[in-house]
Image: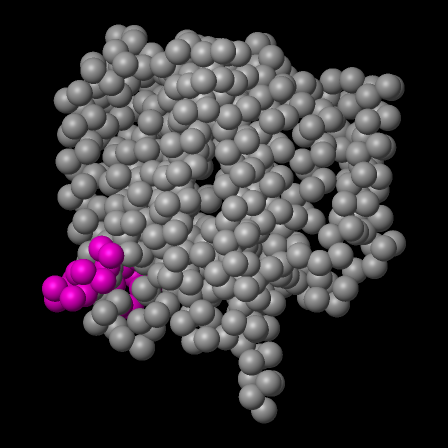
Amino acid sequence: MEKDGAGSEKESSLGSISEGAGLFVLGKGASNTLGLGTTVILTRILGTRLYGFYTYINVLFSLVYVLARLGGDKSLLRFIPEYEEQPRKRKVVVTLAYGTSLLASVAIGGAVFLFAPTISSFTLDDVLFTEILRITAVVIPFNTLSMISYSLFKSIERMDYNVITSSIVKPFLRLVFVGGAVVLGYSVVGAAAGLIVSGVLGFLVAFTLLVKRVEFLGIASPSRSETKEYYNFSLPLTFNQLGSFAYNRTDILMIGFFFTGSAVGVYNAAFLISRILSLPLSAFNQLFPPIASRLYQNGNNDDLEAIYTAVTKMIFMISLFPAIAVLIYAPEILQVFGEGFSQGQYILMLFVIGQLTNALVGPSGYLLMMSDHQYLTMFNQLGSGILNILLNYILITNIGVIGAAVATASVLAAINVLRAWQVWYFEGLSPYDWSYIKPITAGAVSGLIMLSFTLVFDGYLLLVSGMTIGGLSFILVIYALGVSEDETDLIKKVFSVFHL
């Protein structure tokens, strides 16, 4: 009976993760479509230089949001599932997360407004960039609290709310107000103003949904021990997220320091395309952390390993084909963004390799975090961030913009391999077996087919025909080699949301 109970909990947990992934994919499909529309409008109308300004603001603010959240988003994922039977403690965690983030974001937003000329002088060094910084500083508190709200939805395993607010409402508002401002001729200043309007409205939608749908939402005064427990988890994860930013986005900051807005624009277009490959990992990561936390705290390591294995294999299988397609058709894909962007093809290819490694190790980073290794996670991120900064400086100054991509992709691959090893070493969990030969074989066959299409077609016709036939061949080879019952069940659970 005990075994049956364990198996039932495993199936329930895997089902929740899979359905959450399906909802995320559904929402992210809408988000990517809306986001791509906004990006194409900006790149084609603004050009590489002004689009570079817009990009640099967003990257700089992603660093600001890490400091403003102070680990509150990850703390919600950690403690809300643990305190499922303790409503007061849940309110304490919510109070600390929102209160800390509100105070920090207001202070940081004020600092950005005040020191905008100084920030500009050390980066793109442009009067227009200073003006944009001061305009967009207003939106920092609203976006920060929105991010805390998204995390709260995930912590209670309500991916439907998360998808509505973060993957549909947010990008839709940006398309309307950011893209609309540019189309109407207000250029990059109008885009900055559009960020404010969309940020405020997005926060109002998320907060309204929270008030109406989350029962334990409220204010509770934390004790000294509760405050200590919260910050003992959240503050190390702030440094963890700073490290993550350093090894993921420090390249953009340094390109802005050494080069021009045009270089930033081209580089970021390549990065945005490669980021699509992280979609499967992001999808399964939506509900993996709270479920991993619950299983680990309950001592259900067998179920945890089974879920870790199934999820990692599926992430790699889904990510492999698009990675191969982007490697083969990099120049044609970049042409979609307009004139001048295709020069980033080698940058794109390097990022693809890094992202594929990311997919291969699955949710190992979250598994470390949720198994009480937050300090190890912090050192991983900080170490990789420092290494990435050093490598970026050395390679950018010696080989130019491409050096940033070499540095960042290399560090991304290295830290992911390290995480997978640490999960095995400290927790004895490994997701790998010989079944990975199946997707690798399918990838090789589809890659050869897509490569052969380059001898006959070019441009958009090559993209459509090559990726269509290549994708079909990938699926057919997977099917011919055999799909296990576990894989079939997982896929059905992921796509069950499309029948809602």
Asked if one can make out residue 404 in the rendered structure from this viewpoint, the answer is yes
In percent of width and height, residue 61 lies at 32, 30
User: What span is in magenta?
Assistant: 207-232
- Which residue appears at 49% of the width and 11% of the height? 398
Asked if one can make out residue 154 in the rendered structure from this viewpoint, the answer is no
- Which residue appears at 18% of the width and 65% of the height? 226
For residue 329, what is the image quadrant?
top right
Q: Using the image, determine if residue 241 lies above or below residue 486.
A: above
In percent of width and height, residue 57 lies at 34, 23
- Which residue appears at 67% of the width and 36% of the height? 323
Dividing the image into 4 quarters, which one contains the C terminus? bottom right
In percent of width and height, residue 199 lies at 31, 36
Dividing the image into 4 quarters, which one contains the N terminus? bottom right
Q: Is residue 160 left or right of residue 339?
A: left
Q: 244 and 81: which one is in front?
A: 244
Q: Main secondary structure of the magenta part?
A: helix
Q: Is residue 20 left or right of residue 376?
A: right
Q: 156 and 246: which one is in front?
A: 246
